[in-house]
C-alpha cells in the first residue's frame, strides 16, 4: 500500500515523492523519488532510508545501479534516462536485505529538435584507441561524491546545439543517435571551466589518436557522474589533477571532427548521457 507522508529531507529543490511508507517500527525501508514526473533525459534521484545497516540494492529497468551512503541511515542512487528510452512505465526494485520495494514511475515523453544531415564520403570515424579510452572513462564509478551544488556553465558562449537533438542522415532517421551533450559556440581560445569539482581522469589529444573527439578532457565528479569536454584548442590540466567548479581546464577549439570552433560538454551518469540542464539549475545533493 502506498500512502503519502512528508519527505525525509526537505532541503532539496523541487517536490519529492515518498513512494513507500513505514510498515513496521524496526528495520523498515523507505524510498523517495525525485523528480516525481521525470521526462526523457532526466536523472532520477532515489533516496532510501533503512535501519538494516546493509546498503540497498537497486534494480532499474532490469539493470543494477549502485547506492551510496549519505548519512543518517540514508542512501542515494542516481538513475539515468535518455532520449532513446521508451516513455511510459518505469520499474524500480529496492532491496535492503530485509525488505523489497517494487516501485512504478511514469516517464514522460519529450520533443527533441531534429536536424537533417547530408553526408558525402566516409567522414571521420574515429580510432579504436580513442573509443576505448572514452568508454573506460564513462564506465568509471568512484565512491566519493566530489561535486557540490548546482553545476556551473562551462563556457560563456551561446548555446548552439542542445541536448537530445535527433538526426536524419541522407533522409534516413537515425534511431540510435541523439546529441549527447550541449554545444557552446564560444570563440577559439575562450575559457572552458569545470562545471563542478572533480578529478581529471582522461586527457586525450588529437595528435595521439583522438581524431574524432579532438583534444579531450574527462572529469570524474564521483559516484558515476562524469563530464567530458571535446574539440579543445588547449588543455590546461593533466590526468590526476583535482579541479574545482569554475577552474579553467582548457579552451574552445575545433580539433577532431568539428565544423567550426565550439565546446561540446557531455554529462554522463553511469555511462549514459543525460540532460545537463537539471544539474545546472536544480542540482543533485
Image (cartoon, rainbow, N blue to C red):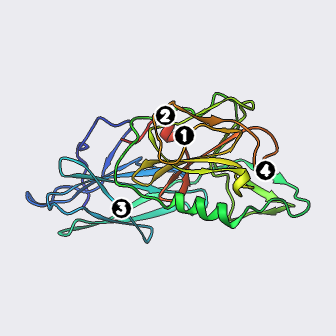
Q: Are marks 1 and 2 in contact (CB under 8 Å)?
A: yes
Q: Nearer the viewer, mark 3 or mark 2?
A: 3
Q: Are marks 3 and 4 in contact (CB under 8 Å)?
A: no
**Mark-to-mark CA distance, 3 and 1:** 23 Å
Question: On the rendered image, what quadrant is the N terminus found in?
Answer: bottom left
**Going by the picture, which residue comes out furthest to the left?**
25
Residue under label 1, please give it.
277
Secondary structure at numbered mark 4: strand
Residue 184 vertical placement versus 226 (above, below): above
Question: On the rendered image, what quadrant is the C terminus found in?
Answer: top left
Residue under label 4, please give it.
115
Q: Nearer the viewer, mark 3 or mark 4?
A: 3
Q: Earlier in the sequence, mark 4 or mark 1?
A: 4
**Mark-to-mark CA distance, 4 and 2:** 26 Å
Q: In which quarter of the image is residue 6?
A: top left
Where residue 34 sits in the image (x, y, percent)?
A: 38, 47
* Residue toward you, 161 or 256: 256
Residue under label 2, please give it.
281
Residue 178 vertical placement versus 277 (above, below): below
* Residue toward you, 253 or 148: 253
Residue under label 3, please give it.
66
Q: Which of marks 4 and 2 is nearer the N terminus?
A: 4
Amino acid at each position: 500500500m502506498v500512502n503519502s507522508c512528508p519527505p525525509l529531507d526537505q532541503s532539496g529543490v523541487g517536490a519529492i515523492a515518498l513512494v513507500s511508507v513505514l510498515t513496521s517500527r524496526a528495520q523498515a525501508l523507505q524510498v523517495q523519488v525525485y523528480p516525481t514526473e521525470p521526462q526523457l533525459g532526466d536523472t532520477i534521484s532515489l533516496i532510501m532510508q533503512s535501519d538494516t545497516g546493509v546498503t540497498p540494492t537497486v534494480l532499474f529497468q532490469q539493470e543494477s545501479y549502485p547506492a551510496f551512503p549519505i548519512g543518517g541511515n540514508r542512501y542515494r542512487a542516481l538513475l539515468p534516462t535518455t532520449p532513446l528510452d521508451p516513455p511510459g512505465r518505469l520499474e524500480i526494485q529496492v532491496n535492503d536485505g530485509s525488505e523489497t520495494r517494487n516501485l512504478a514511475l511514469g516517464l514522460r515523453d519529450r520533443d527533441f529538435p531534429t536536424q537533417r544531415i547530408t553526408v558525402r564520403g566516409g567522414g571521420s570515424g574515429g580510432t579504436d584507441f580513442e573509443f576505448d579510452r572514452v568508454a573506460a572513462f564513462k564506465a568509471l564509478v568512484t565512491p566519493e561524491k566530489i561535486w557540490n551544488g548546482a553545476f556551473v556553465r562551462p563556457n560563456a558562449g551561446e548555446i548552439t546545439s542542445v541536448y537530445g537533438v535527433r538526426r536524419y542522415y541522407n533522409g534516413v532517421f537515425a534511431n540510435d543517435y541523439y546529441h549527447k551533450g550541449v554545444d557552446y559556440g564560444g570563440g577559439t581560445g575562450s575559457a572552458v571551466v569545470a562545471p563542478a569539482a572533480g578529478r581529471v581522469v582522461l586527457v586525450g589529444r588529437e595528435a595521439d589518436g583522438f581524431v574524432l573527439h579532438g583534444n579531450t578532457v574527462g572529469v570524474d565528479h564521483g559516484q558515476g557522474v562524469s563530464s567530458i569536454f571535446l574539440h579543445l584548442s588547449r588543455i590546461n590540466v593533466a590526468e590526476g589533477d583535482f579541479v574545482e567548479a569554475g577552474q579553467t581546464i582548457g579552451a574552445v577549439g575545433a580539433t577532431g571532427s568539428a565544423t567550426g570552433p565550439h565546446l561540446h560538454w557531455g554529462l554522463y551518469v553511469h555511462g549514459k548521457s543525460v540532460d545537463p540542464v537539471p544539474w545546472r539549475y536544480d542540482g543533485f545533493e
